[in-house]
Image (cartoon, grey):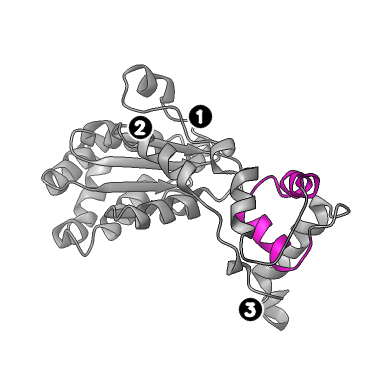
Amino acid sequence: MTATSAFVFPRDRLFARLDGALRAPLALVVASEGSGKSTAVREYLATRAISSVWVDVGAAAGDPAAFVYALAAAFGDRVPAMRSSAASATQRLAGVEGHTAVVDWVREHLGTLEMTIVLDNIHALDDSPALVPLVRDLIEATLAHLRWILIGSSAAALPVAGWLANRLSELPIQDDDLQVDLDELRASLDGTGIELAQPALAKLLETTGGRPLGLAVALTNRRFDEKLSTDQLYDELVDVALERFEGAERG
């Protein structure tokens, strides 16, 4: 199957939206699974040359100690002392101070650092009540000098309403912001030799939900006839994702 990187969709509108969101110290990207949230943020940070570290909240599996280790590992090259002291910090979690000690530990190591921390898969917090207070307090304790971008399909476990009311965050980036629109789809076709009337373009956007990966698969494989179903497109996305595997590994 042809690679899906043949089509690049204009992201100026989305990036301008992210520019606005990052005028506040905390930006939220909350949209449905498969909408391209993480990819869009990575592209944005690279385009704007914004220094960042990434922490996968889901990989912590709801364990505060695992989250501390993941955070320390993310800063390992920039703040080696943070990585070397992570074990001590996790031990303090079980003490009287609890997660407050970890917040103090982070502030001690990152107090003079100015950069962006990306927390991916924050929807994992919905099922991780033990981790929520640590993440919440850590964010709020460092907003004076760090920028945070939170990515996930849900932010229900976090005090988003309070952050909005206190102007710590702008309105979340959502599905509508991430989706490719009609003008962007047209622009992506310039010079490709593909000519589609507006009804066909609208149908393609409807079928793919305007998601960049889905559009790239459909266009690269010339699957833009009006009979294309969402299920068919999904099957092709799966094929693309698995094409590098063989045999039992593919199974």
Q: Is residue 79 left or right of residue 44?
A: left
What span is colored magenta in the figure? 198-223
Q: Quick one: 113 or 86, which is closer to the camera?
A: 113
- Which of the two discs, 1 and 2, labels the residue nearer the N terminus? 2
Type of residue at label 1? Answer: Ala
Q: Tag 3, which secondary structure?
A: loop
Count of picture labels: 3
Mark 3, other Cα within 10 Å: few <14 / some 14–19 / many ≥20: few
The relative height of residue 128 versus residue 215 in the rendered view (above or below) is: above
Q: Tag 1, which secondary structure?
A: loop
Nearer mark to the viewer, of 3 and 1: 3
The residue that mark 2 highlights is 133
Image point (78%, 62%), residue name: 235
Examine the image and state in which quarter residue 25 appears.
top left
Q: CA distance from mark 1 to mark 2?
A: 13 Å
The relative height of residue 26 versus residue 168 in the rendered view (above or below) is: below
Image point (30%, 58%), residue name: 74
Please provide percent x and percent y for residue 35.
59, 47
Which quadrant is the C terminus positioned in?
bottom right
- Which of the two discs, 3 and 2, labels the residue nearer the N terminus? 2
